Image (spheres, rainbow, N blue to C red):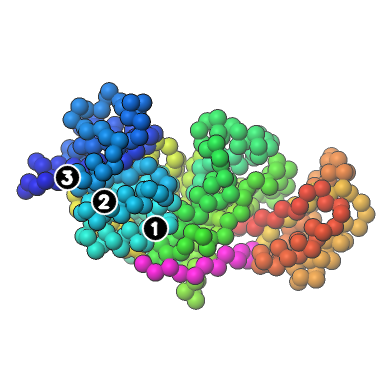
Amino acid sequence: MTSKTQTNGATRVALLGFGTVGQAVTRILCSGEIPHVTLTHIFNRNLARKRADWVPASVTWTESVDDILNSDVSVIIELVGGLRPTYDWVKTAIERGKSVVTANKQLMAHYGIELIDLARQHGKEVRFEASVAGGIPVLRALQDGLAGDRLVEVRGILNGTCAYILSRMQTDNMPFADALADAQRLGYAEADPSEDVDGADAAAKLAIIAAVGLRRPVRVADIATRSIRPIEPVDFLYARELGCTIRQIARASAEDDGMVFAAVRPALVPLASAFGRIEGSQNIVTVRGIFGGETSFSGFGAGGSPTAVAVVSDVISVASHQGSAPANGTATTFHKVNGEFVAPHYVRFIVNDKPGIIAQVTAAYARYGINIEGVLQLPKFRRDRLPFVITLEECPESVLDRALAEIAKSDYHVQPPLSLPIFS
C-alpha cells in the first residue's frame, strides 16, 4: 500500500530538535538498522551551526516548524523540550493527522491528558516512553508487561542529577555545592539546577508514572516536593550509623478513598536496599501490584544514546501499529493528591551547645504527641556547631513540621533543623 505518508512501506518521520538526543536519534534512524522508517525532515534553530554533514542529503533541514507541520510525514519526534511553544506544535501536529513521539516530561506531565485525548479523537498516537527514566522501558512495561496486575504503588529514584550529587556527597564526604559543581562540569546538571535539586523534574516524571501505571492522573502542581539543598555531609555520617544513606525518592500510591498519595523528597533508605545501592546517575523504579508483588526496573536512564533508543522504539511501535500506545490505557480525569508522609523520621540539629537542649526538644515533641525512637551524637565536632540527630517513631509529616517550627524559634540553633522520612 502506498500513500503520501508511507512510501514503499517506509514511514516518513520528521525531527524537531537536533540537540544531544536529537543527534543520537538521527544516527539510529540513518544507520540502516531501521528499514521501515525514513527520516525526511529536521527542524532546528541556527542551522548554520547545527547542520551535520553525516546526515544523508535526502533529509530536508529547516528553521521553520511550519515546514514540518505542513509536510507529508506521519510521525513527528519532538525533542525541543519545554512547554511553549512545543505544546502548540504538538497539538497542531495531532490536529493535522500526525502521531507524536516525545521525550518531553514537562509537556506530558502538564498537558498529557489533553494531548492523549486529542490523539484518540484523530485516531493517532502520542508516545512518551523516553519522558521517564530515559532508556529504561518503564512506561511500556507498566502498560503492557504488567497489564494483568493492578498496580497500587510506585517508588523511584527518577532524577539522575540528584542521584549523582547525593552519591558523590556520600562517597567523598563532599558538600552539596561542590557535588553540584562537579555534576555541572560533567553535564549532569544544568547551569540552573533548580528543577532537578528542588524536585520538579522528578515530580513531572512521577505524574506520568501515576497516570500510566496507577491509572490515576494527578496535576504536577499538587505533588509535594522538598529540595536536597539542605543536606550536608554530616547527614551521611549519621545515616550510616542507622544503616542508611540518603536519596531523592519519588513515591505515589493509589489510596482506597480514590485519592493519590504523591510526593518527592530526600529520604533515608537502607544501604543494603536496591535504592541504597544506586550510584552515579542511575535511576530505579519499583512498582507494587496486588497480584504480582514488587517489580523493579533500573539502569542509566539519562544520556543521549539511552534516551534515543527509547524514542526510536516508540517510533517503530507507531510505524508498525503493533500493540497499544501507553496513552491509550491512561485515564483522563485528575485525582486529588495527598502529600502527607506518615513515616519514621530522621531529624538533624546543628546547635551552639548548652545544657538542656535535648530536654527542650523532647518536651516539644511530647506536646505534639511525637514519640522519640533514639538520640545520636557523634564525637569530635565543635561545640559551637554541634550536630546531633533524633530519630522518631512513625508520625505525620505535617505534625512534625509544626513541632519543628516551634523548636526552631529557640536561640541555640546554628541553622534550621532538617527532617527526612526513613523508608524501610
Residue 331, position as x, y percentages in the image: 36, 67
Counting other residues with Cα less than 10 Å from the Cα at mark 1, is it few (<14), some (14-19), or many (20 or more)? some
Counting other residues with Cα less than 10 Å from the Cα at mark 3, is it few (<14), some (14-19), or many (20 or more)? some
* Real-space CA distance between mark 3 and mark 1, rounded to the nearest whole angstrom: 25 Å
Q: Please tell me which residue is depicted at 55% across the width and 33% down the height of the picture.
A: 184
Q: Is residue 33 above or below residue 66?
A: above
Residue 395 colored in magenta in the image: no
The residue most toward the top is 53
Residue 334 colored in magenta in the image: yes
Residue 153, position as x, y percentages in the image: 48, 63
* Real-space CA distance between mark 2 and mark 3, rounded to the nearest whole angstrom: 11 Å
Q: Is residue 278 above or below residue 184?
A: below
Q: Magenta residues?
A: 332-343
Residue at the disc numbered 2? 93
Quadrant position of residue 17: top left
Q: Secondary structure at mark 3?
A: loop
- Indicate left or right for 160 with 5 as reference: right
Residue at the disc numbered 3? 72
Q: Please tell me which residue is depicted at 67% across the width and 55% down the height of the picture.
A: 420
For the C terminus, the quadrant is bottom right
| Numbered circles on residues, count | 3
Q: Which dot marks residue 111?
A: 1
Q: Is residue 107 visible?
A: yes
Question: Mark 2 vs mark 3: which is more N-terminal?
Answer: 3
